[in-house]
């Protein structure tokens, strides 16, 4: 009886630790996405922030009008960001500022995917699916696919 009670207590304690670790990992993922993607890439054009949370082999993947897939490496996206910054398009403010709402974060081992709602001002513009891996120095975004919300007519 004592063995069963001990095992039950150990199980309850370990599940509490696991739940705490999972919550901690989800918060770390939210922070990476907020800092590197929302603040760095979308709102400020800050290359250091981008590099802090986006892996150098990151790819933005989309579907073209003829249903062919395309891919944009982070280096090319950063070049576009540099140009926008040089053209005075950063920082974004007011109704141009990007924000996100986290819908779900799913983690298995060192792999994760985050589903987020992407807003420009108050307008829901995209639903993003961001894949991440946990490296020795923390979580890094490795790719993104998205759904563009159709314009209302």
Image (cartoon, rainbow, N blue to C red):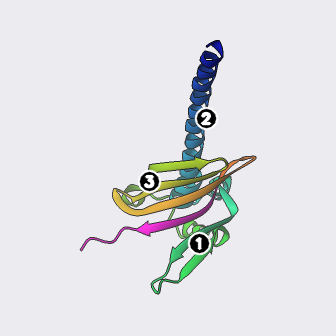
Front residue of this view, candidates 3 and 97:
3
The answer to which image quadrant residue 82 occupies is: bottom right
Residue 124 horizontal/vertical position (percent): 36, 60
Q: Residues within 10 Å of mark 3 (few under 14, many from 20)?
A: some
Q: Which residues are magenta?
A: 141-153
Q: Residue furthest top?
A: 2
N-terminal of the pair, mark 3 or mark 1, is 1
| In this view, 142 is above or below 67 | above
Q: Residue furthest front?
A: 1
How far separated are the C-alphas under marks 3 and 1? 20 Å
Q: Which residue is mark 3?
A: 99
Considering the whole magenta stretch, tell me its main secondary structure.
strand
Residue 9 horizontal/vertical position (percent): 60, 19
What kind of element bears circle 2? helix
Q: Which residue is mark 2?
A: 21
The image shows a total of numbered marks equal to 3
Side (left or right) of 61 relative to 92 = right
Q: Which residue is mark 1?
A: 80
Front residue of this view, candidates 40 and 125:
125
């Amino acid at each position: 009886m004592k063995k069963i009670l001990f095992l039950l207590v150990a199980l309850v304690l370990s599940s509490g630790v696991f739940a705490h670790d999972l919550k901690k990992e989800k918060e770390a993922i939210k922070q990476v996405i907020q800092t590197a993607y929302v603040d760095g890439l979308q709102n400020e054009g800050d290359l250091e922030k981008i590099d802090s949370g986006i892996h150098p082999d990151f790819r933005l993947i989309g579907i073209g009008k003829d249903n062919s897939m395309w891919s944009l490496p982070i280096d090319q996206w950063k070049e576009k960001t540099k140009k926008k910054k040089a053209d005075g398009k950063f920082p974004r403010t007011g109704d141009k500022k990007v924000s996100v709402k986290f819908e779900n974060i799913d983690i298995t081992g060192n792999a994760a995917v985050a589903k987020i709602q992407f807003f420009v001002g108050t307008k829901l513009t995209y639903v993003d699916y961001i894949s991440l891996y946990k490296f020795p120095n923390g979580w890094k975004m490795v790719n993104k696919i998205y759904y563009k919300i159709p314009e209302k007519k």
